[in-house]
Image: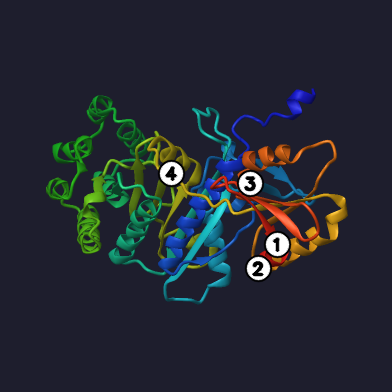
Amino acid sequence: MQDKLLQTPDGVRDTYDVECKKKRKIIEKLHHTLELYSYHDIETPTFEYFDIFNRDKGSAPSNEMYKFFDRDNNTLVLRPDITPSIARCVAKYYKDEQLPIRLCYTGNTYSNPRKLQGKLKEVTQIGAELINDDSSAADAEIIATVVDSFKALGIDEFQIEIGQIDYFKGIVSEAGITEAEELQIKEYINIKNFFGLEEYLKKLDLSPVLKKAFLAFDSLFGGESMLEQAEKLVTNPVSLAAVHRLQRIYKALCCYGYDKYIGFDLSMLNGYNYYTGVIFRGYTYGTGDAVVKGGRYNNLLKQFGKDAPSIGFAFTVEELIMALSRQNIEVSVEYSNTIILYDIENQESAISLGKSLRQNDKKIELIRKSVRKSVEDYLEYAKREHFSGLFYFENSDTVKVFDLVSGDENEVAIASLK
């Protein structure tokens, strides 16, 4: 029983020591990038009412959420997604604001899928939301922010794949098919089963032009030139507008000099139901899934009482850690903590030195030496725990300074350290 208490449940894990330091450093670098684009921090609760994330809001399926009840029998959930929480906050606190709102966040999300497939049930996300701007320039800026975030971590080999939900929706509307038929076609496209899609389309009363448009999703991916091909396949205004918007986004990203990181995939249709236009994912080596996902969700805030266009993205930090490790990209962390080791007769001097150094922003750990342990024992401990140095009080006036980075050892007067 005791051994079981030391284990974590399936789908969650501990993060400690160097890995924890690196995780915080990654978040710090990403957050700094968001600050450079003038995003402001916001924090939302870890759990909220179920209705914030129910199916109409487009988050995870109900049976994949962690649900529980409060004392008034309200159904609460651990957040499976942070964007609906941000939408609720904006509708509440920025109801009358009409100009752009830029918000960023860091937090954990929770999902309980039937099959883990190597995924964690609790992950850390850092993301941003740009609200009250429906322009293609806003779409491009959000994607440029993602590019800069990759570069801030030292990742130079990555790709942003951009899709457009409206291109598919325009064809569906023109075809006049039922919702069930739309979902079936969408499923075939999502799983890349175009043989199955071709057989299914034979059963539907559609023109050859529309059948060709649906089957063309097999090849609607690639560079900017693919958009011209997509444009020729359709005549409905919704799909055409979707292509033209992607072309404007690409032109803006060229102004940033980021066109080499951009690809397009109009068959990218899966994801949260709240996406309404451009969607995108960012991939890099060393992980089997996208490390960042995002898109436009112009109808979500309306469900909370504020009609405002919005676009955002979220990085999954655990996926980034895996990618950085497998690409051998070092995340530099600072080890500047120092141990002050003292015998009991030098306690007053040691505490005084520790207080003085902390007032000068030094990270100090005070340890009273045990008579059962040697100074070498504490030096080994300091190395294991990544301390940069150790001060040992030999008497009330001098300390022996061990520099654990260079390996140097010196005797120094206490007055010179303060």
Q: Residue at x 55, y 51 (%)?
A: 24
Marker disc for residue 78 = 3
Viewer-proximal residue, 54 or 46? 46
Residue found at the far right of this picture: 345
Residue hosting label 2: 360
Which residue lies under the disc numbered 1? 413
Which of labels 2 and 4 is toward the front? 2
Q: In this picture, is 74 found above or below 130?
A: above
Mark 3, residues whose alpha carbon is within 10 Å: few (<14), some, or many (≥20)? many
| Label 4 crowd (10 A; few <14 / some 14-19 / many >=20) | few
Considering only order in the chain, which callout, 1 or 2, is on the residue closer to the N terminus?
A: 2
Residue at point 41%, 47% (across, down):
292
State how the image is colored: rainbow
Mark 3 secondary-structure assignment:
strand
Going by the numbered disc 4, the residue's amino acid type is: Glu
Q: Counting residues from the N terminus, which is met first, the one under dot 4 or under dot 1?
A: 4
Residue 273: x %, y % from top left: 43, 47
The answer to whether residue 16 is visible is: no
